[in-house]
């Protein structure tokens, strides 16, 4: 097989959508699977849509995901520069090649003139298309005499360079995911290649770059499929072999109706960006929401690609060895926020108690709590199976760190009986006399006492949990008291008995 070189070519117009991260991931997996090179090229030729901070955001996102760039702005490489605005002079040279061949031309029509032509067409119920049918009637180097258009150029009149789209010709091409496609050029317009500010449009810039950077496969979003006939014909004009193309299906909203957008995330409370976006209108990120990058990547990989088995958990290395572009589907993949959480849950279960305790300790410190790592290991072990995120551990265990301030009134009404205070005071003295305060020991002493007195286990345990936790939740009660220790247990019983007996 030829040397595989692929690129991820985002435009720095804001935070990188997770659909873009998936495009980067598929490019990366394909490159690594085939011993190839993964290139990051920043496509910033649209000065109007450029957003400060977006380029750094893109790089940081890839880094967080574990997608390693082989060639790029930071990494360097033999095919740079890797930012299109730094390549401006290159594009003009290539546009000139097409002009000299007669495949492109200068067009001097003002934006106002084009606007009014569009308006007129609209009134007549048609769409204005700048193509072979109207080209001769407009102001350009096809319709004007050479002396006339040269004079305009010399005078410095603003112009764009347009591609001279052949009329009524069938263009044939193949897409790895979509198969063979035929499009008639009659539907295409004379696309602008160089804008009046001297910058290339996307179409010219990417073709020149992909050629010069020796890109073997272009794997990108399906929104570029309609432009592919233009791209194929541009390659032909230059006399270059086109790369292989693969157009990835869309990421769809959870209900499957349309493209996944930031608004869907805002409405349903999930992020559609890898990292928090701090500029202007801020946006949530997977990283800050507590996702592990491995879980995030695993989830994204399966949105569009399937391994052909039921297997769902893949590390990056496993993805690299299993990935195949032939197994990427044609139809859009529905994003499922619950499934995203499920992936994180799976990855969290794989962590050792020690790893989780270290992560949870960071969280605790940020919230002003402290505890030794051995105790935290025991604690995370008690609740691990119930949580999907480290921050959930806190929701499950806050009462380990804080004496209840109040008591769940529903529970009080139902489970705090006339005799609860007397019985808990009896239970307190049993515990007070114990030396070993392990869960097993306290449990056996208390169970024996209940049995001996023929007490109602349920009633006692509910009242006991109420004073210790403040509500009827949490793991095994004897695990809780063993963890908080004898002093704290007795203190909580005293507080509960005095407050609830009033
Ligand atoms: N700059 C384009 C985008 O952000 C790249 C498309 C491509 O990969 O060719 O969508």
Image (cartoon, rainbow, N blue to C red):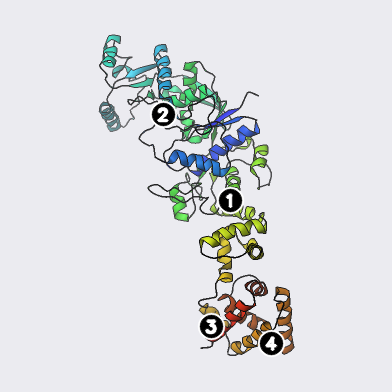
- The answer to whether the beta carbon of the residue marked 1 is less than 8 Å from any atom of ligand 1 is no
Q: Earlier in the sequence, mark 1 or mark 2?
A: 2
Q: What element carries label 1?
A: loop
What is the CA distance from the residue labelled 4 to the residue labelled 1? 48 Å
Q: How crowded is mark 3: few (under 14 residues within 10 Å), some or many (20 or more)?
A: few
Say which mark, if any, is on residue 455.
Answer: 4
Q: Is residue 257 above or below residue 421?
A: above
Front-most of residues 122 and 3: 3
Residue 189, image x and y in percent?
39, 24
Check disc 1 and report the residue beneath it: 292
Q: What element carries label 3?
A: helix
Say which mark, if any, is on residue 450.
Answer: none
Check disc 3 and report the residue beneath it: 413
Q: Earlier in the sequence, mark 3 or mark 4?
A: 3
Asked whether residue 166 is in view, the answer is no
- The answer to whether the beta carbon of the residue marked 3 is less than 8 Å from any atom of ligand 1 is no
Q: How crowded is mark 1: few (under 14 residues within 10 Å), some or many (20 or more)?
A: many
Residue mark closest to the camera, 3 vs 2: 2
Residue mark closest to the camera, 4 vs 1: 1
What is the CA distance from the residue labelled 1 to the residue labelled 2? 34 Å
């Amino acid at each position: 097989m030829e040397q595989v070189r692929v690129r991820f070519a985002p435009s720095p117009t804001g935070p990188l959508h997770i659909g873009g991260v998936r495009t980067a991931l598929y490019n990366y997996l394909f490159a690594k699977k085939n011993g190839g090179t993964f290139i990051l090229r920043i496509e910033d030729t649209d000065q109007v849509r450029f957003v400060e901070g977006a380029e750094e955001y893109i790089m940081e996102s890839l880094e967080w995901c574990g997608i390693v760039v082989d060639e790029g702005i930071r990494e360097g490489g033999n095919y740079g520069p890797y930012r299109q605005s730094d390549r401006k002079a290159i594009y003009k040279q290539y546009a000139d090649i097409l002009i000299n061949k007669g495949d492109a031309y200068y067009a001097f029509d003002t934006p106002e003139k084009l606007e009014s032509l569009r308006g007129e067409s609209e009134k007549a119920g048609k769409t204005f298309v700048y193509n072979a049918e109207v080209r001769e009637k407009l102001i350009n180097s096809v319709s004007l005499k050479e002396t006339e258009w040269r004079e305009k150029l010399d005078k410095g009149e603003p112009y764009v360079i347009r591609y001279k789209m052949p009329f009524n010709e069938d263009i044939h091409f193949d897409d790895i995911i979509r198969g063979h496609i035929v499009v008639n050029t009659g539907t295409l317009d004379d696309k602008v290649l160089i804008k009046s500010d001297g910058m290339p449009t996307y179409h010219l810039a990417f073709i020149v770059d992909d050629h010069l950077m020796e890109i073997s496969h272009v794997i990108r979003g399906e929104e570029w499929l309609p432009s592919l006939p233009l791209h194929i014909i541009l390659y032909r004009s230059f006399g270059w072999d086109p790369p292989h193309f693969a157009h990835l299906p869309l990421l769809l909203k959870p209900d499957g109706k349309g493209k996944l957008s930031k608004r869907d995330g805002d409405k349903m409370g999930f992020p559609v960006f890898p990292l928090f976006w701090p500029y202007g209108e801020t946006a949530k990120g997977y990283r800050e929401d507590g996702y592990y990058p491995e879980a995030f990547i695993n989830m994204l990989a399966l949105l569009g690609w399937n391994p052909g088995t039921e297997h769902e958990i893949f590390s990056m290395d496993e993805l690299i060895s299993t990935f195949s572009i032939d197994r990427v589907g044609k139809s859009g993949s529905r994003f499922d926020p619950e499934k995203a959480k499920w992936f994180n849950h799976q990855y969290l279960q794989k962590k050792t108690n020690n790893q989780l305790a270290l992560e949870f300790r960071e969280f605790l410190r940020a919230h002003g709590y402290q505890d030794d790592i051995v105790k935290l290991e025991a604690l995370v072990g008690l609740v691990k199976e119930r949580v999907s995120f480290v921050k959930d551990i806190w929701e499950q265990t806050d009462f380990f760190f804080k004496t209840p301030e109040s008591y769940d009134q529903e529970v009080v009404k139902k489970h705090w009986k006339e005799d609860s205070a007397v019985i808990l005071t009896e239970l307190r003295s049993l515990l007070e006399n114990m030396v070993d305060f392990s869960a097993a020991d306290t449990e056996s002493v208390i169970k024996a006492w209940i049995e001996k007195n023929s007490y109602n286990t349920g009633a006692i345990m509910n009242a006991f949990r109420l004073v210790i936790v403040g509500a009827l939740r949490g793991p095994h009660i004897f695990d809780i008291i063993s963890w908080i220790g004898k002093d704290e247990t007795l203190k909580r019983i005293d507080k509960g008995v005095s407050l609830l007996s009033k």
